[in-house]
Image (tube, coloured by chain):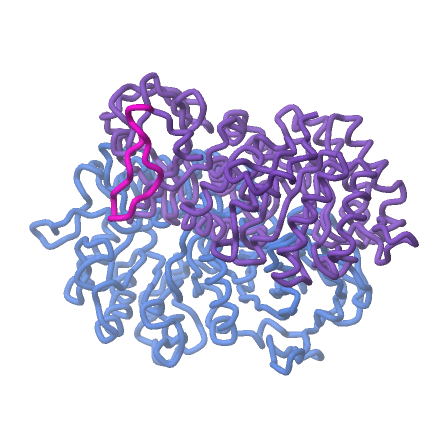
Chain colours: A blue, B purple
Amino acid sequence: MHFAVLVFASVATMTTFGLDNGLMRTPPMGWLAWERYRCDIDCKNDPKNCISENLFIDMADRLFEDGWKELGYVYVNIDDCWSSMERDKDGRLQPDPNRFPGGIQRLARYMHDRGLKLGIYGDMGTHTCGGYPGTTLDKIEIDAQTFADWEVDMFKFDGCYSNAVEQELGYPLMSKALNATGRPIGYSCSWPAYQGGLPPKVNYTQLGQICNLWRNYGDIQDSWNSVLSIVDWFFENQDVLATAAGPGRWNDPDMLVIGDFGLSMEQSRSQMALWAIMAAPLFMSNDLRTISSGAQSILQNKMIISINQDPLGIQGRRILKEKVGIEVFWRPLSNNASALVFFSRRTDMPYRYRTSLSKLNYTTGSYKFTDVYTGKTDVLKDSTEFVVSVNPTGVVMWYVSAPGKLKYHPFLRGGKLHGPAYDAEENNFPRVFL
Amino acid sequence: MHFAVLVFASVATMTTFGLDNGLMRTPPMGWLAWERYRCDIDCKNDPKNCISENLFIDMADRLFEDGWKELGYVYVNIDDCWSSMERDKDGRLQPDPNRFPGGIQRLARYMHDRGLKLGIYGDMGTHTCGGYPGTTLDKIEIDAQTFADWEVDMFKFDGCYSNAVEQELGYPLMSKALNATGRPIGYSCSWPAYQGGLPPKVNYTQLGQICNLWRNYGDIQDSWNSVLSIVDWFFENQDVLATAAGPGRWNDPDMLVIGDFGLSMEQSRSQMALWAIMAAPLFMSNDLRTISSGAQSILQNKMIISINQDPLGIQGRRILKEKVGIEVFWRPLSNNASALVFFSRRTDMPYRYRTSLSKLNYTTGSYKFTDVYTGKTDVLKDSTEFVVSVNPTGVVMWYVSAPGKLKYHPFLRGGKLHGPAYDAEENNFPRVFL
């Protein structure tokens, strides 16, 4: 176990490392109920979709049997509306007895028996967003201990029905309380999303010390507009956000809605690609029992998952916004490799975008690239002009491996400095990023 | 031939009948280049997708070989950017010689040999929207004769680079000129879209006399936002628009973008359903060479096509807007049947909408319905409460056949009278509509 109970004794001296519970050294992956199932508690009329142990068992079975687990999708996470409306006689949260008759611990063991993990949800405040019992400051220790007793592996702490002062106390206290249980529990903090997501109200250095991941922005919905608004916000604020991320501490742009109702196949490929560039947690919220083969193949794309899970854990950036509606994103990866995404905001027809790797700030040399969706591979000199045809609302995504040194120049186009400046002589870009 | 050259002699006395060229007694169906291929004239770098005779031949082959023609998709329509930049020495339009080396007449005969029809495009004004030669008032007769000589079957008359006065002269003149050629040529007028689409600037009685279809509103784009904005406009103005439509004269909400890049499968089913409710022309603008089987099966749904093509030609209406984001649409069909669409604007999860046929203004009795997408059939009493589960941005669409009399009440919910009032005693709803 990599877990260090003593980490909080030395918090004051830790300014550059993440929550040291040894967890989530790469972005967590799994399944989360909220976006697709919300607070559906109508098990009488909607038994297959209501928030109940059956739903989580169904999804666990699919993760286990349909090839998801081997790819890293191991968390099965409960969200709001799981609990009884009353705490028990000892003041502990308890699951709704009709919908979770076996209890949470039995559900956790169901996951563990299959190599999966169970996540649960609470709220820093008087009530959860759905109106269930919240975790006020005086309940933090008992709730953390309850989750540990149940052998839960991850905890999402929402922020409805509390104010900024309570949150400033509660989120660090919960981190401490979870650590104090001795059980490694991944800790997801909604705190920054309730405080606008940006400094000075949000302290990302502190978040990296107390949380494994955090929601910076509003909830995703099942629509392309929603995905776009999230993409816009995260990349417009990339200078603040990218440096906050690293192994054990991740910005969370919220769930993948691939496999639901609102995204086209192109848009699904775009969400997957951009979430990989962002080093985002990959929590699907969909129906794995009925998912289309098209959506499944996007979510199970091994090369994109490996980019998302790159061990350096460097969050990528947007490096170009062209007036024609093409944007280019870039993420540095281990082994001197990198990922490139060409994204089209157009709504007319495929756009033939002409560029070269040198225009994208690659240094002199030859590069091998693989199109992660088509599998096509080729070698390009940095100076070679090439054309990528990018579909409306779609992406072309490349894994680029660099035989030579990779050097990233300060990006001066448009007068604004985008992206980090690497030391070309030392070629030590990961350190510069962190 | 049902064509009547003399129709314009008696225009003044015709106030309730459409352009009497005998064409398009049901909404025209086919394929139109614009939305998907725009003004792509780069045949050197993009030979498969540029506006050239090869593109239209490719699409004709697909319509002919892949089951489209038998379903009614017979028009293959050229849009902008087909012509040379100069008229010929006799003042006639001529196709670009490099992209249409065989000429338009040979292309028309290629269509006719396969039971298909060819459409072409022009612009009432000095230039087309893409900057090609326009049809000024003095060129109307020669251009109409050119199209007839080429054996063209349909003509779309755009309205860039002209003013309201010129349009008021030009659109009726072109109608007369087309009729005067003696060749039946379906006539699509963009006129109302250039005049805001609504009375008093737009005279729908006159449009029905001179045009077979007309574009009321802006161009569709390959996005759900665009489809929604069109749906909103057409149903918000349904009281004006629905009465304008009928056999031979149709409102045109623009092309189907099903099979392109921006719509999910749910959204594709919604566009198809709502275009059928609107009695809209069904012009696909997509790549029939590479279309997915999912999109193809939506576009080839026989029951929806038969609803769209119902011989009564009555444009349907929105009859309910629920605060929860569910809307209900209804279209009366021949044989005392009707079509119902339950549409969800939600972006969260499937909504279980509870209602009954009596709440949707069906009279006492039993009704047989068929879900046009699932094929499920059942019988419902008017008073029976039922639940339809409507997916986010999706529809449930029913073909309802009425064993008894169908009576439609004035719709009073929300204080506003929606839809037509039928004479319950005479049960003659088609006449009331027209």
- Residue B308, position in %: x, y? 52, 32
Compared to residue A44, the image places residue A305 above or below, namely below
**Which quadrant of the rendered structure holds the N terminus of chain A?**
bottom left
In the figure, residue A401 lies in which quadrant?
bottom right
Looking at the image, residue B404 sits to the left or right of residue B120; the answer is left
Q: Residue furthest left?
A: A89
Compared to residue A356, the image places residue A432 above or below, namely below
Q: Name the residue: 70% across, 47% down.
A: B174
Compared to residue B153, the image places residue B88 above or below, namely below
Instruction: Name the one closer to the observer, A160 or B173.
Output: B173
Q: Examine the structure image and report whether residue A32 is included in the region drawn in magenta.
A: no
Q: Examine the structure image and report whether residue B415 is included in the region drawn in magenta.
A: yes
Q: Which residues are magenta?
A: B408-426
- Residue B223, position in %: x, y? 54, 51
Q: Residue furthest right?
A: B89
Instruction: Name the one closer to the observer, B248 or B379.
Output: B248
Q: Residue furthest top?
A: B403
Magenta-highlighted stretch: main secondary structure? loop
Instruction: Name the one closer to the observer, B23 or A272.
Output: B23
Q: Name the residue: 86% across, 58% down.
A: B86
Looking at the image, residue A222 sits to the left or right of residue B261; the answer is left
Q: Name the residue: 70% across, 25% down.
A: B1
Q: Name the residue: 85% across, 48% down.
A: B99
Look at the image and tell me whether residue A431 can be seen.
Answer: yes
- Residue A225, position in %: x, y? 47, 57
Look at the image and tell me whether residue A69 can be seen.
Answer: no
In the figure, residue B159 lies in which quadrant?
bottom right
- Residue A184, position in %: x, y? 34, 57
Q: How many marks?
A: 0
